[in-house]
Image (cartoon, coloured by chain):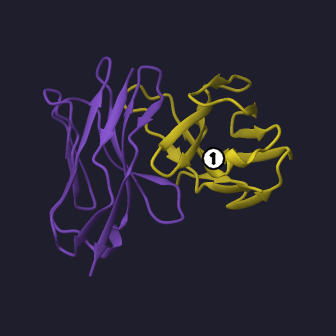
Amino acid sequence: GDSVTQMEGPVTLSEEAFLTINCTYTATGYPSLFWYVQYPGEGLQLLLKATKADDKGSNKGFEATYRKETTSFHLEKGSVQVSDSAVYFCALSDLGGKLIFGQGTELSVKP
Amino acid sequence: DVKVTQSSRYLVKRTGEKVFLECVQDMDHENMFWYRQDPGLGLRLIYFSYDVKMKEKGDIPEGYSVSREKKERFSLILESASTNQTSMYLCASSPVDRDSYEQYFGPGTRLTVT
């Protein structure tokens, strides 16, 4: 079945460091891909998405490119801030319209 | 602004009690979902619904049931709460959009069963 694998956390970075969170997937067909973010004590918010191969999603300085050849959707940010501390979830949409989530990666940014 | 609301942010119940978690969306979305979130396990789908009075089992439906009497409301029911149902419960909704299936989430209900 469809699945999503994310790099394990927690990831701890200093402010202004470069961030990469790896995400790879297995899917039937051509799913849409998503990154969601969960700040402490809150629900999930959509961070960015890509609906077809080679699309780049971007928002708030974060970017991810839909790579069909490597079945990946890695999240990157050039300079993280303390306010980026959160849990990040990679997800794909299956043929029935459900989302399949990775296990989440906790990011902690220190000043 | 799109909105999904859940009836409680925090809930404490006793073992054996019947528990109702309510979710309401104001976006006229067809699809609604219930997940539970546990550390290290990510989000796991409990039940979902593509239309009023319609429901489908997700990956972990045991011990739960749902009700969708109106399009905007999707309720999760724990018939007899147990301690292993202590978790964060998240509700989501999405339109029928084959280009993305983007889901919108509520703030979550942290349920503790003692």
- Where is residue B101, by image quadrant? top left
Which residue lies under the disc numbered 1? B26
Residue A48 x, y percent position in the rendering:
32, 48
Amino acid found under the numbered disc labelled 1: Asp
Q: Is residue A70 left or right of residue B107?
A: left
Q: Chain of mark 1?
A: B
x and y percent of residue A45 in the render? 44, 53
Q: Residue at x 77, y 39 (%)?
A: B77
Front position in the image: A94 or B44: B44
Residue at the limit of the structure toward the right, as seen here: B17
Is B71 situated left or right of B69 in this image?
left
Is A59 located above or below residue B93 in the figure? below
Tell me which corner region of the image, top left, top right, bottom left or bottom right, holds residue A69. Answer: top left
User: Counting other residues with Cα less than 10 Å from the Cα at mark 1, is it few (<14), some (14-19), or many (20 or more)?
Assistant: some
What residue is at 48 percent from the left and 53 percent from the top?
A44
**Count of numbered badges drawn on the protein:** 1
Q: In the rendered image, which quarter is residue B84 located in?
A: top right
Nearer to the camera, A9 or A51? A9
Q: Give how far across and how far down residue B110 sits, in percent.
A: 65, 57
Q: Colour of chain B?
A: yellow
The image shows residue A69, relative to residue B103, as above or below, that is: above
Q: Which lettered chain is shown in purple? A: A
Percent x, y of residue A106: 36, 59
**In the rendered image of this protein, does residue B62 appear above or below residue B19?**
above
Residue under the point 18% across and 28% down: A68
Classify mark 1: helix, strand or loop. Answer: loop
